[in-house]
Amino acid sequence: MDKEISQAVIARLPRYFRYLGELKDSGVERISSQELSRLMHVTASQIRQDFNNFGGFGQQGYGYNVEYLYTEIGKILGLDKKHHLIIIGAGNLGQALANYMNFERRGFIFTGVFDINEKLHGKMIRGMKVRPMEEMQEFVRENNIDIAVLTIPKEGAAAAAEKLVGMGIKAIWNFAHVDLDVPDSVQVENVHLSDSLIKLSYMINQYENELEEKEKNASGEA
Ligand code: NAI
């Protein structure tokens, strides 16, 4: 693909992929951009524009083949390959992620869990034993681990990231509230659930302000 695809388009692909996966699972074979638009609450022209970045994926008017679209978007997202993950930090968040079965359906295989707290060592989390940090290097090498999930407090995150980079990890899914300084060869996705919650607060505010405005206008007109 020669053309540079905008980050905004890339950011929308996981959502398309999720909806198409659900359609596929419920036996839908074809879908038009209008139907997909209604389902996803985005305009049909946005969908067509997004898909045009990748050659269109199907004939207009006739709709898209759901299975084909799902597979092609999956390939763009690199989901046709399996990724092996380890979790660093077997606390509340680490355990919740390890126990969420759906990641596996997308090809993300949780393979190991590590923690600094020796009281947790040997504890089983979804069939995986919590291991000491000292075993991490050998484990990463032997199990072809490409992604590390950091669910530890920010104080330990930089040192953990440095170790992981040294072990040749390809990517870090970073839940620690700190920006990591890693080489360009290592991909980092920072997750801040609170950003999403704060956005919700903004949406409540915005809705209520609009409602108030409408009520004011209506009483002014009366
Ligand atoms: P937790 O206290 O239940 O678990 C943290 C675990 O990390 C503990 O088992 C601890 O022994 C281990 N740990 C600490 N330092 C370590 C190190 N250097 N190496 C390996 N293991 C280490 O905490 P919880 O609730 O699981 O949260 C984990 C972190 O994730 C917190 O710092 C929190 O701020 C952050 N967090 C981030 C969210 C986000 O959206 N980004 C959402 C929730 C929590």
Image (tube, helix red, strand yellow):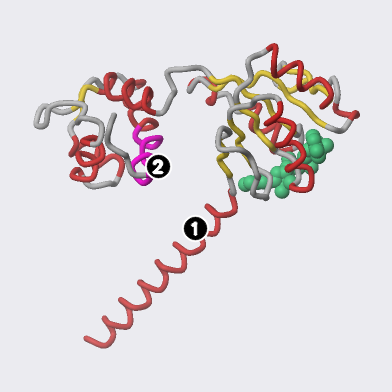
In percent of width and height, residue 204 lies at 46, 64
Left or right: 51 in relation to 96: left
Query: Ligand 1 closer than 8 Å to the CB at disc 1?
Result: no
Q: Secondary structure at mark 2?
A: helix
- Measuring 33% from the left and 20% from the top, which residue is drawn there? 71
The residue stretch that appears in magenta: 7-16
Q: Residues within 10 Å of mark 1 (few under 14, many from 20)?
A: few
In terms of depth relative to the viewer, which is nearer, 174 or 163?
163
The residue under the point 40% across, 42% down is 11
Could you tell me which residue is drawn at 85 percent across and 19 percent down? 122
Which residue lies under the disc numbered 1? 200
Ligand 1 shown in quarter: top right
Main SS of the magenta part reads helix
Q: Relative to residue 48, is residue 155 drawn left or right?
A: right
Look at the picture and state if 174 lies above or below 147. Answer: below
Q: Which mark is residue 11?
A: 2
Q: Which mark is residue 64?
A: none
Q: Quadrant of residue 29?
A: top left
> What residue occupies the far top of the structure in this picture?
142
Q: Quadrant of residue 159?
A: top right
- Name the residue rendered at 28%, 39% in the picture: 39
Of helix, strand and loop, which one carries label 1? helix
Asked whether 216 falls inside the magenta stretch, the response is no
Residue type at tag 1: Leu
| Disc nearer the start of the sequence (1/2) | 2
Q: Does residue 205 appear to the left or right of 125 in the view shown?
A: left
Which is in the foreground here, disc 1 or disc 2? Answer: 2
* The quadrant where residue 162 appears: top right
Quadrant for the C terminus in the image: bottom left
